[in-house]
Image (spheres, helix red, strand yellow):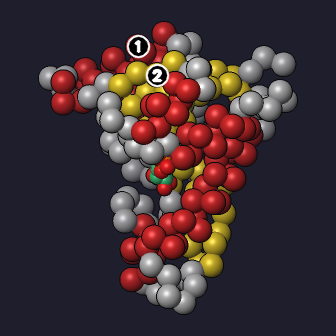
Amino acid sequence: MSRKRVAILISGRGSNMSALIEAAKAPDYPAEVVGVLSNRAAAQGLEIAAAHGIATASLAQSKFPSRDMFEDIMTQMLESWDVDIVCLAGFMRILGEDFVNRWAGTMINIHPSLLPLYKGLHTHERALADGAKVHGCTVHFVTPGLDEGSPILQAEVPVLPGDTPETLSARVLVEEHRIYPEALRLLASAEIRAH
Ligand code: GRF
């Protein structure tokens, strides 16, 4: 079995990144994590990845004259790792069209809502404010429109009386860690394709 080479893009704690790294340790998993790239040098996930022996890099967009140049360097870095699939895992930057198109069909993201509901930020707060009874998360292909690519997997969780954004996000996160490795497995084993 030839395993797909995966890079993970992060900005922070990297718990979804960790879930992908753990899943990829299984000998029959169809993907291996070859690099982790952060746009923040202080991202905790970088240390976790390095402790697993995975190549890491951090690139601050503010150091580049334009977003295009920043994203060109990101693509060069990913190509230097010979990456087949890019997983966004809490990467807090909106990506430009050229970068997204370069990785079309091979770049996926985890979003903490049942898309198409609650695109963008503060999803748990907004679900609670709406009195939603059900909330959840989605793994989807990345397309130029924010959180608009076709979904690969979703998981629902109940919204419980007394929930705060913190309790709700913790319940959703458990499901994120379950469906993200499963969605990557589907993509890496070519059981799904972008359409
Ligand atoms: C997750 O809730 C993910 O859905 C969202 O950003 C958060 C990242 O958390 N895109 P972590 O860095 O994976 O712990």
- Mark 2 crowdedness (10 Å alpha carbons): few <14, some 14-19, many ≥20: some
SS at mark 2 in the image: strand
Quadrant of the rendered structure where residue 59 is? top left
Q: Residue under circle 2?
A: 56
User: Nearer the observer, disc 1 or disc 2?
Assistant: 2
Quadrant (top left/top right/bottom left/bottom right) for the N terminus: top right
Residue 12 image position (x, y, % from top left): 40, 43
- Mark 1 crowdedness (10 Å alpha carbons): few <14, some 14-19, many ≥20: few
Does residue 46 lie above or below 153 as drawn? above
Quadrant of the rendered structure where residue 93 is? top left
Q: How many callouts does the rendering have?
A: 2
| Residue that protrudes farthest toward the top in the picture | 80
Residue 66 image position (x, y, % from top left): 18, 26
SS at mark 1 in the image: helix
> Who's the residue at 49% across and 13% down the image?
79
> Who's the residue at 55% across and 27% down the image?
51
In the rendered view, does 4 fall on the left or right side of 12? right
Which numbered tag is attached to residue 76?
1
In the rendered view, does 97 fall on the left or right side of 184? left
Quadrant (top left/top right/bottom left/bottom right) for the C terminus: top right
